[in-house]
Structures are given as structure tokens and as C-alpha cells.
Amino acid sequence: MSTPLISLARHWQDANTLTLPVALAPWILEPASLTARLKQHCQHFRLQVLQEYSAVLPEFLQPLLPDTNAVQVREVILWCNDMPCVYAQSWLPEQTITKLRPLADLGERPLGDYIFQHQSLHRGTIEAAQLDVMLPQLNIAACCYVRRSVFQLEGQPLLVAEAFLPDISKLEATL
């Protein structure tokens, strides 16, 4: 059984109540698709799947996804202009995947490209925290801001967390 490359076991707070770094705040507080925002700020965008596997939902995430036991975990890097800018982790409950089959087979398609095309999408509170990100395969070892949200899509829940990697600072956050 696989485990996430980065643990989300942290103290999270409503991002709107935090004093965030000026350069990161537009990224962290973005209510729409982070994928779409990244694509606006770079010439070349790509998604790299790091790992995808079935798992049991950890106890610390159960309050966010109640009545969930089995999940599919997907970990990806969002690249802009050949720079790793965002590490994303999604937790898709088995019942969500059963109802929304395309979520099971995204491949290198960004989750945001799929979910933000649905009018039924509802995003919960954007929460933020800081955590140490260790991704040796990308030569990244840094303290990064991370955000997470629970989405409801056609009444089905899913959790998405995104860590803003050091190279995000090389992109202009505002248009």
C-alpha cells in the first residue's frame, strides 16, 4: 500500500483569516480553478502524475470526508514553463468515483479541467497551512504554503490540497 509523498496532518486555518505572503495570497485565495490561473501565467503548462493508488482514508481526514473509508489518492506536479510550481494531492472517495467515473481515469488531464466545467460544483472553505515539502526527485526541500478544500460535485465529495512550490514565485500572480 502506498502513502502520500507529503502528509497533510497539520493544523489548518481558514485562509481568509490568515496574514499570507503578498506574492502568494492571490494563488492561495483563488476561488476558481488553480489550473486555469496557472495556464494564464505561463507559456507551457503540463501535469506530471507522481503516483495514483487506492487507500484507506486516514483518521485525520475523516472529518472532511465523513462516511468515507476507501479512497483513490492522486499526486501530481503542475509545471509552468518547465518549473515545478504546484504539488497537488486529491482524495477521491470510492462512492464519488463510482458516480463520476471520469475522475478515475484522468491520466495527465488536470482535475481542475474536469471539475470546474460542472455547474453543480461547490467549493468549501479554503484552508491553509505551512508544511515542509520534501520532493527529492525534483530537488525540492522547502517550507511551503499549502491550501485545501473539500468540493461537492453532483453531491459527491472530494478533497484537494495544493502546495505552492518555490518556483511559483517566478510567475506573476496578478494579471
Image: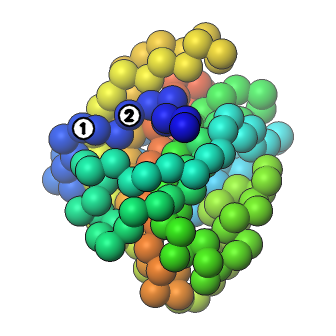
Image quadrant holding the N terminus, namely top right
- Find residue 130 and report its horizontal and vertical position in percent: 30, 32
Whether residue 15 is visible, yes or no, is no
Please, what secondary structure does the residue beneath circle 1 have?
loop
Residue at figure coordinates x 58%, y 13% from the top left = 136
- Find residue 143 and report its horizontal and vertical position in percent: 37, 21
Query: Front-most of 151 and 63?
Result: 63
How crowded is the residue under tag 2: few (<14 C-alpha within 10 Å), some, or many (20+)? Answer: few
Residue with the mark numbered 1: 10
Residue at figure coordinates x 49%, y 35% from the top left = 3
- Find residue 74 and report its horizontal and vertical position in percent: 60, 48
Asked if the residues shown at circle 2 and circle 1 are in contact, with their CB atoms under 8 angstroms apart, the answer is yes
- Find residue 41 and report its horizontal and vertical position in percent: 68, 45
**Left or right for 175, reference 128:** right
Q: Which image quadrant for residue 14?
A: bottom left
As measured in the structure, the alpha-carbon distance from the residue carrying label 2 to the one carrying label 1 is: 8 Å
Residue with the mark numbered 2: 7
The residue under label 1 is which amino acid type?
Answer: Arg
Please, what secondary structure does the residue beneath circle 2 have?
loop
